[in-house]
Amino acid sequence: MGDYYSEERHGPHEYFELGDFELESGITLPGARIGYKTHGKLNRAKDNAILFPHMWSGTPKAMEIFIGRNRPLDPDRYFIVLPGQFANGFSSSPSNTPPPFNGGAFPNVSIGDDVRAQHRLVTEEYGIERLELVLGWSMGAEQTYEWAVRYPNMVKRALPFAGTAKTTPHDYIFVRSHEDSLKSDPAWNGGFYRDQSEVHVGLRRHAQIWSVMGLCPEFYSAEAWRGAGFTSLEDFLRRFWEGYFAPMDPNNLIWMGWKWRHGDVSRHTGGDLAAALSRITARTYVVPFSRDMFFPPADCEAEQKLIPNSEFRVVDSLWAHFAMFCMTDSDREQIDACIADLLKDEVA
Amino acid sequence: MGDYYSEERHGPHEYFELGDFELESGITLPGARIGYKTHGKLNRAKDNAILFPHMWSGTPKAMEIFIGRNRPLDPDRYFIVLPGQFANGFSSSPSNTPPPFNGGAFPNVSIGDDVRAQHRLVTEEYGIERLELVLGWSMGAEQTYEWAVRYPNMVKRALPFAGTAKTTPHDYIFVRSHEDSLKSDPAWNGGFYRDQSEVHVGLRRHAQIWSVMGLCPEFYSAEAWRGAGFTSLEDFLRRFWEGYFAPMDPNNLIWMGWKWRHGDVSRHTGGDLAAALSRITARTYVVPFSRDMFFPPADCEAEQKLIPNSEFRVVDSLWAHFAMFCMTDSDREQIDACIADLLKDEVA
């Protein structure tokens, strides 16, 4: 795995040991754990905690760009927990689990598994009874919805960015096409390659699919990559897309993707999405990104209308789904404004 | 190649022999020819001719669904020529050309090559000096634009559906991802497989990319495939997408795709798209399809504004880019209305 999944690259983690953890699939994962980071301090009343799970392909480090003094997520005021999802390379993952669950034999994990593990972390490790805010982007949004539906009394505010409570069919086939591109590598061997660098052809093919669907036509027509320091379209494809995915472990990506495409809060209500979303008591902002090719605003708005105390906002960006990378000041300011405004809303 | 590229499946063709045909790439293709079909009769004045080139992956047969008595393209009134583009499996193609230009060694062909060959067909074979209408969908739209810019005096009306005069960067990387998925087949061998059935893994992978980008999220959410007789999402993916591509020759698709992604009428004006489009004298309707993921209406409208005597219309369909398949009555009626209205417009 080279040293991509190292603290040198992703900063120090703490670990919460789950022991023998029964997954929703029915498999028990021995010695399961999640890596996480925290910023700020939990106050005595334990009422200043914010939970901020990360997106597919990321680690807690990816969400740290939103934390800072005089930012909405101010560590002087809040205790901010950044939990790592299963299969992210730090929490229990294909890349770090011993046999029989190593590599391509890792068991399927679910958004519900992530959220149950996070629930144990915040209650057992910190004794937190209610979270001021749960927020997340993309798969982080899926986890946010799962929190708000599964533990409604614990979530005071919820802020899902560019994600859905129930994966749409189009999103499902999109994510499955990622998997298949990774598995198309000639050295794939059922996920039992020795090192991810052996399967770089699949990783590059996968990066190519992302380059088409991950951004939008207007992004490329406007050559918006120039603003981020790239010198040509090919330069952007190589250094941004291939460069991003090249050091990652394909199994980790695939297992996170399985969670992504099976995300569905209506599991809790026999398939009735309206019933599931009506459980949410959190003050909720549903915030898609304009031009997002796989979480289009219309899909997010349809869910927002089913959430009682909610508001719909759109972040407008040429970076489409990747507005959350804050490659422009405008993107960062719009996202910060959503967080700041929601934290200001009075909630009983 | 099995017998996919047969008259049994695609109906009878006529052939126009081009002889030694010099391509824009500088290569001369010996014994070049284009297959074509005609409907109706050319009148004495030779002023009732319509040219209707077909889309990528298609043959002239695909456009016949728009021809019929009491339809706008009425063979009792018009002489309708359906030219086959290079690499479609009937015109000179990787699948039917002898060495040295067989299979993976076929020379690059361009939209300009297609249109020059069609120009020879209509002028040399039929002595036509002006076409009442040139129309086409997708790559057919590219050929329509090329006609209107290259031979403005010969095109009285132009009707590009869901295509662009200059390929956008996003469209370019989308088409290149098709190529790479086809070439990812373990038996690819530089395009020198014995039979296309040997490289069905790449064809299926390619079908999968089309299933994601070829339609749109709303299509899948609404399960619009039900209206076309499919019984589940997986049934649709297998019988519609895999079934469509499975019998085709990957080299043919790749060489058509190369043409597609290099389409650019501004070649004629030193890269100045506005100058190229200002050459068009045809009465022109620019008609994108709503929800098209790779020819979004905004891209088409930007070009329409550069065309002097033009009008912008949008066909509204859940079938996105594939509205032209006329899987619903509404799609067929909207498309027919565009053709009918344009043919009624008085043109000097």
Image: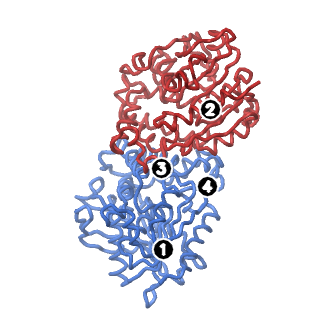
Chain colours: A red, B blue
* Picture coordinates of residue B328, whole percent (x, y): 63, 61
Q: CA distance from mark 3 to mark 1?
A: 26 Å
Dot 2 amino acid type:
Pro
Residue at the spot of label 2: A160
Q: Amino acid at mark 3?
A: Glu
Residue at figure coordinates x 43%, y 52% from the top left: B171
Q: From the viewer's perspective, is the residue at label 1 or at label 4 nearer?
A: 1
Q: CA distance from mark 2 to mark 1?
A: 47 Å
Same chain under badges 3 and 1? The reply is no
| The one of A286 and B7 positioned closer to us in this rendering | A286
Of tags 4 and 3, the one toward the viewer is 3
Q: Which residue is mark 1?
A: B309
Q: Earlier in the sequence, mark 2 or mark 3?
A: 2
Identify the residue under disc 3.
A218
Q: Residues within 10 Å of mark 4 (few under 14, many from 20)?
A: many
Per the rendering, the mark at residue B318 is 4
Q: Which chain does the residue under circle 4 lie in?
A: B
Q: From the viewer's perspective, is residue B37 above or below residue A177?
A: below
Tags 2 and 1 on a common chain: no
Quadrant showing the N terminus of chain A: top left
What is the C-alpha distance between the residues marked 2 and 3?
A: 24 Å
Query: What type is the residue that disc 1 sits on?
Result: Asn
Task: Specify the quadrant of the image occupied by residue A185.
Answer: top left
Helix, strand or loop status at disc 3: helix
